[in-house]
Amino acid sequence: MRVVAAMSGGVDSAVAAARMLDAGHEVVGVHLALAQSAATLRESARGCCTIEDAGDARRVADRLGIPFYVWDMAERFREDVVEDFVSEYAAGRTPNPCLRCNEKIKFAALLDKALALGFDAVATGHYAQVVEVTDPAVPGGLRRELRRAVDPAKDQSYVLGVLDADQLARSFFPLGDSTKPQIREEAAARGFSVAKKPDSHDICFIADGDTRGWLAGRLGERPGPIVDVDGTVLGEHGGAHGYTVGQRRGLGLKVPAADGSPRYVVSTDTRTNTVVVGPEELLGVDVIEGDHLRWCGPVPVGEQRVGAQVRAHGQEIPATALVEGGDGIPGRVRVHLDERVRGVAPGQSVVLYAGTRVVGSATIAATGSRGAAVD
C-alpha cells in the first residue's frame, strides 16, 4: 500500500512510520502545519506544531530514507478545531479538541487529501488497534474494528471514537500492540534523535496551559455572580465560559460553606453568565444523553450493554445504551450508567465499548439522574 505517515515530530509517530516501512508499505512522511504562528521553539513539553517539531520529523524521515512533506492545514485547523473550541465554551459546553481534531483534521482533511493524491491509507502514532474480523454482512466478508491498545496507560481509543467504518478501513495504528517504554527503546535502537523527547500534553494550541486566560483573551472579561444552589451570591467570576462542571480550584470564594466542606462548580449558564457551586454529592450523574453520533462499525440496535467512558483517561463504567431517532429524526443515544460519575459536562464526549472494541461516540448534550429530569 501507499501510505501517508502523519509525523508530528514526536517519538510515537516516528516509530509508527518506521513500522509501516518495515511492513513493506510505500511510506511518505507528512507533517501537519496546524499553528498559524509556528516560527517559535518549544520551551516545554506543552504544545506542538513548532519549527522544532517539523525539524524533528524531517530528521526521522531522512534517517528512514522516505520522502517528507509539510502540509499546511492551519486555516482548516483554526476553523474546525480552534473556533469550535471557543464557540463551545461560549455556549457553556466543555469540548474535547483532540476528538474534534481527529474527526475533522487527521482522519478527514488529511485522509481526504491523501486519497486524492493516490495514497491508500494514513498511519498515525496513536495507541490503539485495528483488527480485521469476519463479517458476511459486509462486502468482502471482512470488517475492521477499532480496539483498545494493549497498554492501558497509553490507550488512545477514546479520542479515536469519532472515526467511522470508512475511515477505519484506511487507517493504521502500528503502536497498539506495544507499551510506551518499548516504543522509546525501539526509537533509540533505530537511532532516532526523538527517542527521549518529552510527550506533548494538554491542549496543543494553548501552549502555556492557561485555558481560562486564553479564552478570556478571545471572549473577553464578563464579570458575573458565583452563587450556591439556593441562589445566594458567594463571589464573582470573570466569565462563565471560564468554568466547567466539577471544577474546584480557582473559584475565589470568600464565603466558606457552613460545614467547611469544599465547593465545586455544579453548572454554568452562559446566558445569564452565572456559575453555580455546591457540595461534591451534587456532581454525580448516572444518565447521559448524547448527540452527534459517530459509529466505528454497525449501529447498535435496541438496548445494548456497553462500557461508557467520559474522559480520555477516565474509568470505563458498565452501562446500558439505547440509540433513539431515525426516519429523519436526528439521532441521540441515552446511556444509563450502573454507577454515578462525577463532573460530567455537556460538550464532553461519551465513548461506548463492547469489551475492548470501540462501538462509537456521542457528544454529551445533557446529564441527569434516574427518576429526575435530564438537564
Image (spheres, grey):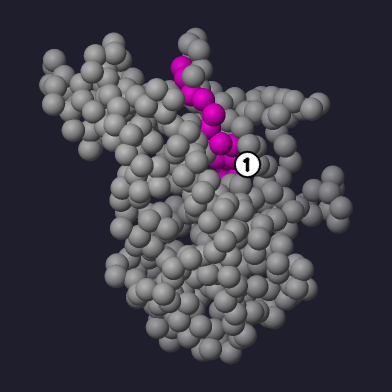
Q: Residue at x 42, y 59 (%)?
A: 204
Comparing 173 with 255, the one in front is 255
Comparing 274 with 298, the one in front is 274
* Residue 237 at x, y percent in the picture: 26, 32
Query: Against 205, is 115 above or below?
Result: below
- Amino acid type at circle 1 is Gly
Q: Secondary structure at mark 1?
A: strand
Query: Against 229, is 133 above or below?
Result: below
Q: Does the magenta-highlighted stretch encompass residue 54?
A: no
Q: Is residue 149 left or right of residue 39?
A: right
Query: Against 91, is 213 above or below?
Result: below
Name the quadrant containing residue 66: bottom right
* Residue 366 at x, y percent in the picture: 51, 25
Comparing 302 with 90, the one in front is 90
On the image, numbered disc 1 is attached to which residue? 360
Number of numbered discs on residues: 1
Q: Is residue 157 left or right of residue 49?
A: right
* Residue 371 at x, y percent in the picture: 49, 10
Name the quadrant containing residue 335: top right
Q: Residue at x 55, y 69 (%)?
A: 32
Comparing 52 with 213, the one in front is 213
Q: Main secondary structure of the magenta part?
A: strand
Q: Pointer 1: residues within 10 angstroms few (<14), some, or many (20+)?
A: many
Q: Which residues are magenta?
A: 350-369
Hey, which residue is sitting farthest right in the picture? 139
Q: Residue at x 29, y 13 (%)?
A: 231
Q: Residue at x 18, y 33 (%)?
A: 252
